[in-house]
Image: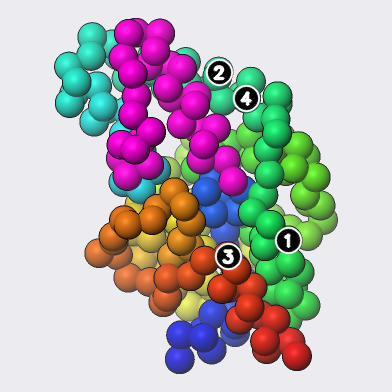
Amino acid sequence: MSVELILSAECYLWDFDGCFADTEKLHFLAYREAFAKVGHTLSESDYYPSFTHLGDGTGREIAQHRIAVAEDEIIRSKSEAYARLIRQGPVACFAETLPIIRLMRARGAKVAIASNSSQEEIRVVLSSAGFPSAELDLIVGKQPDLRKKPAPDIFLHALAQLGCSPERALVLEDSNRGLQAAAAAGCAALWMRTRYNEGLETPQPHVQSLTHAQLLKYFEAVGQ
Protein backbone atom coordinates (compact mmCIF):
# COMPACT_ATOMS: atom_id res chain seq x y z
CA MET A 1 0.00 0.00 0.00
CA SER A 2 2.77 2.44 0.88
CA VAL A 3 4.53 1.90 -2.46
CA GLU A 4 1.29 2.52 -4.34
CA LEU A 5 0.75 5.73 -2.39
CA ILE A 6 4.30 6.90 -3.07
CA LEU A 7 3.98 6.36 -6.80
CA SER A 8 0.42 7.58 -7.30
CA ALA A 9 0.56 11.09 -5.82
CA GLU A 10 -0.67 13.93 -8.01
CA CYS A 11 1.85 16.36 -6.57
CA TYR A 12 5.06 16.03 -4.62
CA LEU A 13 6.22 18.66 -2.14
CA TRP A 14 9.93 18.53 -1.44
CA ASP A 15 11.60 20.04 1.58
CA PHE A 16 14.77 21.71 0.36
CA ASP A 17 17.74 21.66 2.76
CA GLY A 18 18.97 18.16 3.51
CA CYS A 19 16.25 16.61 1.39
CA PHE A 20 16.37 18.12 -2.11
CA ALA A 21 19.76 19.83 -1.82
CA ASP A 22 22.78 18.67 0.15
CA THR A 23 23.14 21.94 2.05
CA GLU A 24 22.90 20.96 5.72
CA LYS A 25 26.68 21.06 6.16
CA LEU A 26 26.68 24.66 4.96
CA HIS A 27 23.94 25.59 7.43
CA PHE A 28 26.06 24.05 10.20
CA LEU A 29 29.15 25.97 9.11
CA ALA A 30 27.16 29.20 9.04
CA TYR A 31 25.80 28.63 12.55
CA ARG A 32 29.23 27.63 13.81
CA GLU A 33 30.64 30.89 12.48
CA ALA A 34 27.85 32.90 14.11
CA PHE A 35 28.37 31.27 17.51
CA ALA A 36 32.15 31.57 17.25
CA LYS A 37 31.77 35.35 17.13
CA VAL A 38 30.39 35.23 20.68
CA GLY A 39 32.98 32.75 21.91
CA HIS A 40 30.97 29.55 21.70
CA THR A 41 31.93 26.38 19.79
CA LEU A 42 28.95 24.66 18.18
CA SER A 43 29.24 20.87 18.06
CA GLU A 44 28.43 19.29 14.70
CA SER A 45 27.26 16.07 16.37
CA ASP A 46 24.74 18.09 18.39
CA TYR A 47 23.75 20.37 15.52
CA TYR A 48 21.79 18.00 13.26
CA PRO A 49 19.51 16.51 15.95
CA SER A 50 18.80 19.90 17.53
CA PHE A 51 18.80 22.48 14.74
CA THR A 52 17.81 20.39 11.72
CA HIS A 53 15.63 17.63 13.12
CA LEU A 54 13.74 19.40 15.89
CA GLY A 55 14.10 23.06 14.91
CA ASP A 56 14.48 26.05 17.25
CA GLY A 57 18.05 24.97 17.87
CA THR A 58 19.37 28.50 18.29
CA GLY A 59 17.33 29.22 21.39
CA ARG A 60 18.06 25.77 22.78
CA GLU A 61 21.82 26.20 22.30
CA ILE A 62 21.83 29.64 23.92
CA ALA A 63 19.82 28.45 26.93
CA GLN A 64 21.73 25.19 27.41
CA HIS A 65 25.15 26.87 27.38
CA ARG A 66 24.04 30.13 29.00
CA ILE A 67 25.44 32.25 26.19
CA ALA A 68 25.08 35.99 26.65
CA VAL A 69 23.65 36.80 23.22
CA ALA A 70 20.25 37.55 21.73
CA GLU A 71 18.80 34.84 19.53
CA ASP A 72 18.09 37.39 16.78
CA GLU A 73 21.77 38.32 16.69
CA ILE A 74 22.83 34.72 16.07
CA ILE A 75 20.16 34.25 13.41
CA ARG A 76 21.18 37.44 11.62
CA SER A 77 24.86 36.54 11.70
CA LYS A 78 24.12 33.01 10.53
CA SER A 79 22.02 34.27 7.61
CA GLU A 80 24.86 36.51 6.44
CA ALA A 81 27.36 33.65 6.66
CA TYR A 82 25.06 31.21 4.83
CA ALA A 83 24.39 33.69 2.02
CA ARG A 84 28.14 33.98 1.49
CA LEU A 85 28.76 30.23 1.66
CA ILE A 86 26.15 29.25 -0.93
CA ARG A 87 27.60 31.79 -3.34
CA GLN A 88 31.14 30.54 -2.78
CA GLY A 89 30.16 26.90 -3.37
CA PRO A 90 30.47 24.14 -4.09
CA VAL A 91 26.78 23.42 -3.64
CA ALA A 92 25.04 20.28 -4.84
CA CYS A 93 21.67 18.60 -4.94
CA PHE A 94 21.56 14.94 -3.99
CA ALA A 95 22.59 12.88 -7.00
CA GLU A 96 19.23 11.12 -7.22
CA THR A 97 17.06 14.25 -6.90
CA LEU A 98 16.85 15.15 -10.58
CA PRO A 99 16.28 11.58 -11.86
CA ILE A 100 13.53 11.09 -9.25
CA ILE A 101 11.81 14.34 -10.20
CA ARG A 102 11.92 13.51 -13.91
CA LEU A 103 10.27 10.16 -13.22
CA MET A 104 7.64 11.87 -11.05
CA ARG A 105 6.86 14.29 -13.86
CA ALA A 106 6.80 11.48 -16.40
CA ARG A 107 3.88 10.06 -14.44
CA GLY A 108 2.02 13.34 -14.82
CA ALA A 109 2.64 14.65 -11.31
CA LYS A 110 3.43 18.20 -10.31
CA VAL A 111 6.61 18.82 -8.33
CA ALA A 112 7.33 21.70 -5.96
CA ILE A 113 9.82 22.82 -3.36
CA ALA A 114 8.18 23.90 -0.09
CA SER A 115 10.80 25.10 2.36
CA ASN A 116 11.53 27.22 5.42
CA SER A 117 14.44 28.72 3.46
CA SER A 118 13.92 31.89 1.45
CA GLN A 119 13.12 31.62 -2.23
CA GLU A 120 16.23 33.69 -2.97
CA GLU A 121 18.48 31.21 -1.14
CA ILE A 122 16.79 28.29 -2.88
CA ARG A 123 17.32 29.82 -6.32
CA VAL A 124 20.97 30.59 -5.56
CA VAL A 125 21.57 26.98 -4.55
CA LEU A 126 19.73 25.61 -7.61
CA SER A 127 21.76 27.85 -9.90
CA SER A 128 25.06 26.95 -8.21
CA ALA A 129 24.20 23.25 -8.38
CA GLY A 130 23.23 23.49 -12.04
CA PHE A 131 19.73 22.19 -11.36
CA PRO A 132 17.29 22.93 -14.24
CA SER A 133 14.52 24.99 -12.62
CA ALA A 134 12.21 24.11 -15.53
CA GLU A 135 11.80 20.70 -13.87
CA LEU A 136 9.89 22.37 -11.01
CA ASP A 137 6.30 23.60 -11.11
CA LEU A 138 6.65 25.83 -8.05
CA ILE A 139 9.07 27.07 -5.41
CA VAL A 140 7.63 28.22 -2.07
CA GLY A 141 9.98 29.63 0.54
CA LYS A 142 9.41 31.44 3.81
CA GLN A 143 7.16 34.47 3.61
CA PRO A 144 6.06 37.02 6.22
CA ASP A 145 2.46 35.79 6.02
CA LEU A 146 3.34 32.09 6.34
CA ARG A 147 4.35 30.42 9.60
CA LYS A 148 7.44 28.26 9.33
CA LYS A 149 7.38 24.49 9.81
CA PRO A 150 6.26 22.71 11.99
CA ALA A 151 3.20 24.83 11.12
CA PRO A 152 1.47 23.58 7.94
CA ASP A 153 1.26 26.99 6.22
CA ILE A 154 4.03 26.52 3.65
CA PHE A 155 2.65 23.17 2.49
CA LEU A 156 -0.94 24.44 2.36
CA HIS A 157 0.15 27.49 0.38
CA ALA A 158 2.02 25.30 -2.12
CA LEU A 159 -0.98 22.99 -2.51
CA ALA A 160 -3.29 25.94 -3.15
CA GLN A 161 -0.93 27.26 -5.83
CA LEU A 162 -0.74 23.84 -7.48
CA GLY A 163 -4.48 23.21 -7.26
CA CYS A 164 -3.89 19.95 -5.42
CA SER A 165 -5.71 18.59 -2.36
CA PRO A 166 -3.68 17.32 0.63
CA GLU A 167 -5.12 13.83 0.09
CA ARG A 168 -3.48 13.64 -3.34
CA ALA A 169 -0.10 15.00 -2.27
CA LEU A 170 3.03 13.41 -0.89
CA VAL A 171 5.56 15.40 1.15
CA LEU A 172 9.25 14.49 1.17
CA GLU A 173 10.91 15.53 4.43
CA ASP A 174 14.07 14.79 6.38
CA SER A 175 13.18 16.22 9.80
CA ASN A 176 10.75 15.75 12.65
CA ARG A 177 9.43 19.31 12.31
CA GLY A 178 8.85 18.81 8.58
CA LEU A 179 6.93 15.59 9.12
CA GLN A 180 4.90 17.37 11.81
CA ALA A 181 4.03 20.12 9.31
CA ALA A 182 2.99 17.54 6.71
CA ALA A 183 0.68 15.82 9.19
CA ALA A 184 -0.84 19.16 10.19
CA ALA A 185 -1.47 19.91 6.50
CA GLY A 186 -3.24 16.55 6.04
CA CYS A 187 -0.55 15.18 3.72
CA ALA A 188 1.08 11.77 3.65
CA ALA A 189 4.86 12.01 3.97
CA LEU A 190 8.07 10.17 3.25
CA TRP A 191 10.90 10.42 5.73
CA MET A 192 14.01 10.78 3.60
CA ARG A 193 17.04 9.25 5.32
CA THR A 194 20.50 10.75 4.84
CA ARG A 195 23.80 10.81 6.65
CA TYR A 196 22.50 13.82 8.59
CA ASN A 197 19.58 12.05 10.27
CA GLU A 198 21.09 8.59 10.77
CA GLY A 199 20.10 7.20 14.14
CA LEU A 200 17.39 9.79 14.73
CA GLU A 201 13.79 8.85 15.43
CA THR A 202 10.46 10.58 14.98
CA PRO A 203 6.98 10.06 16.44
CA GLN A 204 5.45 11.78 13.43
CA PRO A 205 3.46 9.69 10.92
CA HIS A 206 5.15 8.81 7.65
CA VAL A 207 4.37 6.37 4.86
CA GLN A 208 7.88 4.97 4.73
CA SER A 209 11.49 5.79 5.53
CA LEU A 210 13.71 5.74 2.43
CA THR A 211 17.07 6.89 1.16
CA HIS A 212 17.20 8.81 -2.11
CA ALA A 213 18.63 5.73 -3.84
CA GLN A 214 15.79 3.55 -2.58
CA LEU A 215 13.16 6.02 -3.74
CA LEU A 216 14.76 6.24 -7.17
CA LYS A 217 14.62 2.44 -7.47
CA TYR A 218 10.87 2.51 -6.74
CA PHE A 219 10.23 4.88 -9.62
CA GLU A 220 12.62 3.11 -11.96
CA ALA A 221 10.98 -0.24 -11.28
CA VAL A 222 7.48 0.97 -12.11
CA GLY A 223 8.74 2.60 -15.30
CA GLN A 224 10.12 -0.65 -16.67
Residue occupied by mark 1: 98
Residue ID for mark 3: 212
Callout 4 amino acid = Leu
Q: Please state the horizontal and vertical placement of residue 64, each as a whole percent of the image.
A: 17, 26
Q: CA distance from mark 1 to mark 3?
A: 11 Å
- Can the viewer see residue 142 in this picture? no
In magenta, the rendered stretch is 22-50
Q: Earlier in the sequence, mark 2 or mark 4?
A: 2
Cα–Cα span, label 3 and label 4: 25 Å
In this view, 6 is above or below 190: below
* Alpha-carbon span between mark 1 and mark 2: 28 Å
- Please identify the quarter of the rendering in which residue 181 is found: bottom left
- Cα distance between the residues tagged 1 and 4: 23 Å
For the residue labelled by badge 2, is the local secondary structure a helix, a strand or a loop? Answer: helix
Viewer-nearest of labels 1 and 2?
Answer: 1
Q: Secondary structure at mark 3?
A: helix
Q: CA distance from mark 2 to mark 4?
A: 9 Å
Q: Position of residue 39 (x, y in %)?
A: 32, 8
The N terminus sits in image quarter: bottom left
Q: Nearer the viewer, mark 1 or mark 3?
A: 3
Q: Amino acid at mark 3?
A: His
Q: How many marks?
A: 4
Q: Which residue is mark 4?
A: 85
In magenta stretch: residue 53? no
Q: Mark 2 — residue?
A: 80
Which circle's residue, 2 or 3, is located before the other in the chain? 2
Tell me the quarter of the image containing the C terminus.
bottom right
Q: Is residue 53 left or right of residue 12?
A: left
